[in-house]
Every structure is written in structure tokens, then in C-alpha cells.
Amino acid sequence: MRAFGSDSPLPEAALRAAGPPRYPRPERWSAPLALKPARAAEAALKLGLVTIGDLLEHLPRDRSAARTVAGLVPGETATVVVEVRSISSRPVRRRGMRPLVEAVVADETGPMKATFFNQPWLEQRYRPGTRLMLQGKFEGRNAFRVQGHAATAEAAGGDGEVATYPATEGLTSTQILATLREQRGIAAHAIEPLPARMRVEEALPDRTAALLAAHFGDHEAGRGRLAFEELLLLQIAL
């Protein structure tokens, strides 16, 4: 097999790096990003997130700790994936504050109480059995003060790191991450602009692998590949 636009054959390493043929479907990459509620959809537009492809190219700005319930440290801000066991609301004495929502949530390492402020409707939205991604502060004594939340299909529990995203009012970093996890399969439809020979010579992953790494794996390696691509395309355009 020869390189595109060249009389030189591709080396074996380039063929191996290219992997099996992929057939991206651009219409899936450019499909509209559907978010609920309407407030989240409006906030996504403010961030320039119109399509699923836009979402996958919305790279994290930082990483934060992902924890199991048992692994939480008092005073720590972290992300947990848990399942709702029970949920209820109670009035707050302070004037102007909406009822407080408290949920008993758990993963395989144990339960804790999660507190949501000024969002009484969550009692109806997050029924027992719902899996949630929660970001917030662990206050000790199994009490977790929720700062960001989203329903997720992820299995409860797990340690490591999770990405933190540029967000805005109406769409939190936690919601962005949960949506990315749901749409991660669309990364396979990213168009690869770099030839296999160049990726081998520069030891670069393909674009799909780079996007997935930037969000869910080796953050720096993923961003490095995407930055290389951006600089190269800018140079070509000059």
C-alpha cells in the first residue's frame, strides 16, 4: 500500500498504527446535541455546544478526584457515582430558601447522605434506584454537600480522576461529563486529518483515541495529540 499522494510505500509500522479500516459517519458526529431540561440546552448553546462533535471537542480544563463513598476524606471536594436508596425533602427555617432535599445514596463500599440545596423538584426526578454522578464536598460523618449532579448509566463506585469542564449557569461540569460518557461512542466517527505515516513518526494516537484520552484517560497525551493537529493545520493554512 502506498501513501496518499506519494510513490513511497507505507512502512509496516504505519500500517499497524492505522489499524483496521474505520468508516466514520459524519452525520453522527454532526448530530444535534439534545440536552434536558431546556435550561441546560440553552446553556450549552452559550458554550458553543451545538452538535455531539462540539461536545467531544469541549476539552476539560482540569482533573478532580473520583472516589468511592468509603474513600472520601472529610473536607475533600470529589466526584462519586452512587445509586439513590431513598430521597425526601424537608422545609428550611431560613426565609426565602426552598425545601432541602436529602437522599441516602450508596455504592458498593457503603452509604452516605447527600444534600441538595434549593432544588425541591429533585425529589421527584431522582427516584430510588437512579444512578447519579455527584460532585461536591464531603463534610464527614457520611454527609455530602452536593454542588453538581447528573443522572448517569455508569456503575456505582470507583476511584481515580475525572475531568472538570468549562461550564456555565444552567449546565454544570458534572452534567457535561455525564453526557460525554453517554456519547463517547460517537468519538469513533471523528475524521482523522493526520496520515498514518505522520502519526507513526511523531508517535501520535489517532484522533478518536486522542479525544477519548483527553476526556477519560491520559489527559496530557490526548491534549498533546490534538494540539499538534491544531498547530499543523494552522501552518498549512498560512
Image (cartoon, rainbow, N blue to C red):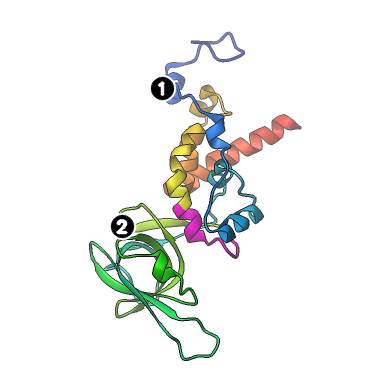
Picture coordinates of residue 77 (x, y %)? 42, 70
> Which residue: 66% across, 33% down?
233
For label 2, the residue is 158
Q: CA distance from mark 1 to mark 2?
A: 32 Å
Residue closer to the observer: 170 or 68: 170
- Disc 1, disc 2: CB below 8 Å? no
Q: Which residues are magenta?
A: 167-178
Q: Residues within 10 Å of mark 1 (few under 14, many from 20)?
A: few
**In which quadrant will I find the C terminus?**
top right
Q: Secondary structure at mark 2?
A: loop
- The total of numbered circles placed on residues is 2
Q: Which residue is mark 1?
A: 20
Callout 2 amino acid: Gly
Q: Residue 6 falls in which quadrant of the image?
A: top right
Please tell me which residue is depicted at 53% across the width and 90% down the height of the picture: 95
Q: Is residue 141 left or right of residue 47?
A: left
Measured as percent of width and height from the top left, residue 131 is found at 34, 59
Q: Secondary structure at mark 1?
A: loop
Q: Is residue 165 visible?
A: yes
